[in-house]
Image: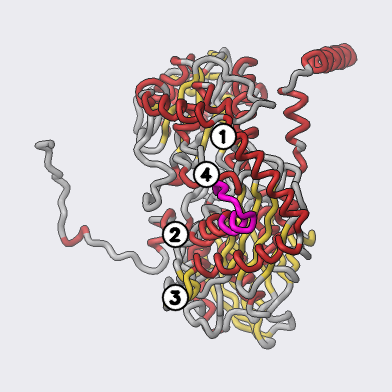
Amino acid sequence: MTDKKNTTNYGDESIIHLEGVEHIRRRPGMYIGRLGDGSNREDGIYVLLKETIDNSIDEFNEGFGKRIEIEIEENHSAKVRDYGRGIPLGGLIPAVSQLNTGAKYDTSVFTASVGLNGVGLKAVNALSQKFVARSHRDGQYHEATFEYGKLISDNYGETTEEDGTYIYFEPDPQQFRNFRFRAEYVEFMLRNYTYLNTGLAIYYNNRRIASRNGLEDLLNDNMTATPLYDIIHIKGDSIDIAFTHANQNGEEYYSYVNGQHTTQGGTHQSAFKEHIAKTIKEHLGKNYEPNDIRNGLVAAIAIRVIEPTFESQTKIKLGSLTMTPNGGVSINKYVGDFIKTEVDNFLHKNQDVADVMLQKIQESEKERKAMAGVTKLARERAKKANLHNRKLRDCRIHFSDAKNERKEESSIFITEGDSASGSITKSRDVNTQAVFSLRGKPLNSFGLTKKVVYENEEFNLLQAALDIEDGLDTLRYNKVIVATDADVDGMHIRLLIITFFLQFFPELIKKGHVYVLQTPLFRVRNKKTKIKNKSIVAEAQAKDKDKKKSDFVTRYCYSEDERLKAIEQLGPEPEITRFKGLGEISPEEFVNFIGPDMRLEQVTLHKTDQVQKLLEYYMGKNTMERQNFIIENLVIEEDRAEEEV
């Protein structure tokens, strides 16, 4: 308890009503989840693009417009043109600027739309420094231009263009600091649309993206391990599933509702997991464990639901329990009945596939039983180990906190050594940032069985901290950040940790949860009195306004090029510090590197990466081959240097 009282004047004037879309600008997280700068595929600028495209997809699903054109200009603005019916001209301005306004409430007009709440385009409008909406309909057009959600101009006229809707938007740089669209994330989003909408052609910067085989193409394009049998692809009236077992550990799922990629799953994905295991078990006639049946499973499920309920405006997790809003059949029963009938029929007709499936399940069961004793002891050891004191400095908010608005911010830093973990621990946001401290270099897990996860204390405690033993459904942190020194040893530790994830929890990487922390290599600073460029001094003074006054202007440099540029700006005679390890950076400085401007490099995993070959080469037992490679390439660099001289 505290004796302090809030002395703020709380009166009638404290009650504020926000007009129009001002609430979106004040509380963007309620509508688009996170802001970000575009370095993560779930950052807000991609939500803005998705919300715009969703309307065009809804038109396609209603049978209007088989082509969508998307153009990203200089990575900072977007154009989306569809050839659907076009927004009714008289309703254009309300449809893009007035909350709780739209046609998606009428299921006779849009039968199974992903847009439901009359928010999507309004959020795009409100969070853009410029937004243009133009509708072409029956030889007429209506165009409206907005800035920061406020109407600037609107025009009517005649047109010869085909019916449809055109949207242009520039995200507000005040909301999305230093943002840019990443082409690979945009393309990933667009490909997902085409997998779910066969017959649709999307032109991205004039390049055609389409899918002929739907979910089968999705799995083929995303699997990084070898499938053990041809993908099983079965379609129903409102459901579409595809799956296979691959030569890998863990489970991998891609789930969709009305064309929306539900990256965090939901009731439809849970139903699929439950009933695919149950159906296969009953077909094989043996009481196999569900986890053994699903180990190595790679699957996709897409369903169409009338007026679905999502857990947030970003629509990344389905909350609906039934296929229609007024009750009716449950999603669990609908998915279960479909799988029980169709998958069982398939396996009866394709005994060779059932035999391969059985062999994979038996291998998983054998491995699980072989390490059953080890697993039990390891779990007991993990419980007894006081994680909060020995290895883990936890945070208060976790990714598994379903109803917490800040769960997306939750992260854990994996670092090595007491000094490095100490600096991060003292600098972190205790609400959203946890720290896990390794003791020395972890084991090279390449080529080892999952038994090593339980026998090795470091890996066992790390798995327990992340809570991913049975998959990602219980993952405690949205971002798993590898934070090691920027030297040879730090790089080696980083590779060993990533190898561990690739071997046993590849979905952690494929779902975009693993990052590498970028910390500065140099600090360059100089006294303000010595700097001739007045704008640099003014900038430093502005930053110091609400902080402890400093006589120095400081630049933190993440590369040699940045160091040279800083010296040029801050000379003459700047003071240069080379950071050799994280432990050398004081907590007072470290807070600059793990705050809002934190630099992270996402670890990605694609089919074209040839992960197994890379791991075999760099983490395998071919030591002499790697040594020869290093020696040969060092010689090449020396020759190149001599040529330059």
Amino acid identity at mark 3: Pro
- Viewer-proximal residue, 482 or 614? 614
Which mark is in front, 4 or 2?
4
> Is tag 1's residue or tag 4's residue first in the polypeptide sequence?
1
Q: Earlier in the sequence, mark 4 or mark 2?
A: 2
Query: Which of the two labelled residues, at mark 3 and mark 1, occupies the earlier sequence position?
Result: 3
Viewer-nearest residue: 402 or 425: 402
Q: Position of residue 209 (x, y in %)?
A: 76, 61
* Residue at position x 63%, y 24% in the image: 445
Between the C-alphas of marks 2 and 3, the distance is 17 Å
- Residue 184 location in percent, x, y? 69, 48
Do we see residue 536 in this rendering? Answer: yes
Q: Looking at the image, tell me whether mark 3 or mark 4 is earlier in sequence order.
A: 3
Give the extent of the magenta segment.
Answer: 278-290
Residue 130's place in the image compared with 305, above or below, is: above
Label 2 or label 3, whichever comes before in sequence order? 2
Label number found at residue 10: none
Q: Nearer the viewer, mark 2 or mark 3?
A: 3
- Residue 518 vertical position relative to residue 145 in the rendered view, above or below: above
User: Residue 472: which disc?
Assistant: 4
Look at the numbered discs 1 and 2 and tell me whether their residues touch, using CB distance below 8 Å. Answer: no
In the rendered structure, find residue 369 and report the number of the disc placed on it: 1
Which residue carries the number 2 mark? Answer: 312
Q: CA distance from mark 3 to mark 4?
A: 29 Å
Mark 4, residues whose alpha carbon is within 10 Å: few (<14), some, or many (≥20)?
A: some
- Identify which residue, 242 or 62, lies in the foreground: 242
Q: Nearer the viewer, mark 1 or mark 2?
A: 1
Q: Secondary structure at mark 2?
A: loop
The image quadrant where one finds the C terminus is: top right
How would you classify the magenta stretch by its main secondary structure? helix
Q: Mark 2 and 3 residues: CB-CB less than 8 Å, in contact?
A: no
